[in-house]
Structure formats: structure tokens, C-alpha cells
Amino acid sequence: MTHAPNGSTTPAGWYPDPSFPQQMRWWDGVQWTPHLAPASQQFMPLQRVLISNQTPVLNPFIWALVLLPLVSLLLVLTWQPEFRTITTRQGVTTLDPMSMYTPGYFLLQASGLVVYGVSVLMAYLDYRRLARSGVVRPFHWAWCFLSPAVYVIGRTVIVRKVAPGRGMGPVWGLIGMVVLALIVAGFKMANMMQSLYSQFGYSINA
């Protein structure tokens, strides 16, 4: 029962069970799975089929996608911008706008690109895992190109439809990451303002 329903290149989907044509069985693109559905399902392609309570809806890929921003947050905390002053021809001392472009700054920007690329890869692997678990039409991984948050939210909506009461973990993780990012940004901004005021000879309490 491991042969493709219509050839070895048949895409994942619901097909008549070779052993019992009165029901549908999920083909994951490689082999038949234990997931079953009524035969009438073939006439209702838009209806989503509930998956078994024993079928996991969370996996390492979705958690990696949610937690990847921690890499950038850690780099933000270690980045120490430098503030230098320059004196214009008119004798006015001002901040050198190029002074913040340190190696740490460029490392931070590069890490953002890497995190973005890895997030898309994690979304693709998560999408494939859900499809092989019997989730009909999972939220497409390509939405991650728009934003990893869009993928996490869309994925959760679909998972909640096929597995009621489960799958909210990634959204809560996403909310936690947003709160943490705001805290880190506030701390870093306060630290930068303190350094900037000190550079110009002012006290932050003045």
C-alpha cells in the first residue's frame, strides 16, 4: 500500500484508499499515511478534515522560526555604538553621523538577513511536515517572505481548524518575542542616549 495512487509523481492529497475505496486516505507525496476521511470528501475540496488528537501540530521547525529573532536581540545587546564629534568650519561641534557605522553595526545588519533567510527555510520545512501529517492545505510557507509573523499567525489559524484547541503555542511565543524586543529596544535606546549626552558634556538628569 505504499505505491502512488496515480504514479510516483502524484502530489500530496486525499485519494481513494486502495484497500477500501469507500474512504479517502492521505497520500503525503511519498507514501500512504494512516489519516482517513469519508469518501464524500473528494466532492468537498474546500472542507478541512480534522486530524487525530495523537497527530502533533508543533515541531522543531516552527519553534526555531519563532525563536530565531533572539539571535538579533543578543547582537543588539552586545553592540556598542561609538559617538564621535566633529568641528565644522564655523567652529560648531556636532555629532559625526558616520561614527555609528562600526563593525558591530554591519554584523547586526548581516544577522538580520541571515535570520530572515533561515526563517523562510524553517517555514518551508514546517509546511512540509504539516502536509505529511495530514493537514489539508496548510498555510503556505511563501507567506514568510512577507513576514515570519504573518506565517506564524496564518499557520495557527489553519491548525486550529483541523486540531481544535491546539496549536496556539507559536502565537504566544511570537507575542513574547515582540514584548522582549520592545524591552531590549527601550534599554538600548536609553543606553545610547546616556552615551550621547555624556559625549556632549551633559548629564542625563540635568
Image (tube, rainbow, N blue to C red):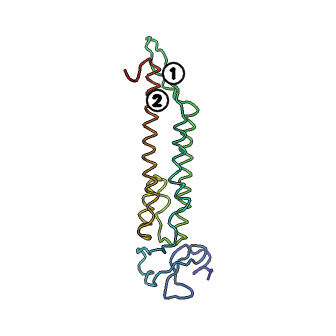
Instruction: Label 2, secondary structure: give it.
Output: helix
Q: How many marks?
A: 2
- The C terminus: image quadrant: top left
Q: Crowding near pointer 2: few (<14 within 10 Å), some, many (20+)? A: some
Percent from the top left, x then y, of residue 63? Answer: 52, 56
Q: Give the answer, above or below, for where 61 lies relative to 23.
A: above
Residue at position x 50%, y 60% from top?
A: 141
Q: Amino acid at mark 2?
A: Met
Q: Quadrant of residue 163?
A: bottom left
Residue at position x 45%, y 83% from top?
A: 38
Q: Quadrant of residue 90?
A: top left
Where does label 2 land, which residue? 192
Extreme residue toward the front, this view = 205
Percent from the top left, x then y, of residue 121? Answer: 56, 56
Q: CA distance from mark 1 to mark 2?
A: 13 Å
Percent from the top left, x then y, of residue 31? Answer: 60, 76
- The N terminus: image quadrant: bottom right
Where does label 1 land, which residue? 84
Q: Which label is found at residue 51?
A: none
Q: Crowding near pointer 1: few (<14 within 10 Å), some, many (20+)? A: some
Work out whether mark 1 precedes mark 2 in sequence or the reverse, and give the earlier one.
1
Percent from the top left, x then y, of residue 200? Answer: 44, 18
Q: Amino acid at mark 1?
A: Arg
Q: State left or right for residue 81 relative to residue 204.
A: right
Extreme residue toward the left, this view = 206
Q: Nearer the viewer, mark 1 or mark 2?
A: 2
Q: Give the answer, above or below, for where 26 lies relative to 194.
A: below
Instruction: Label 1, secondary structure: give it.
Output: loop
Q: Give the answer, above or below, for where 201 lies relative to 107.
A: above
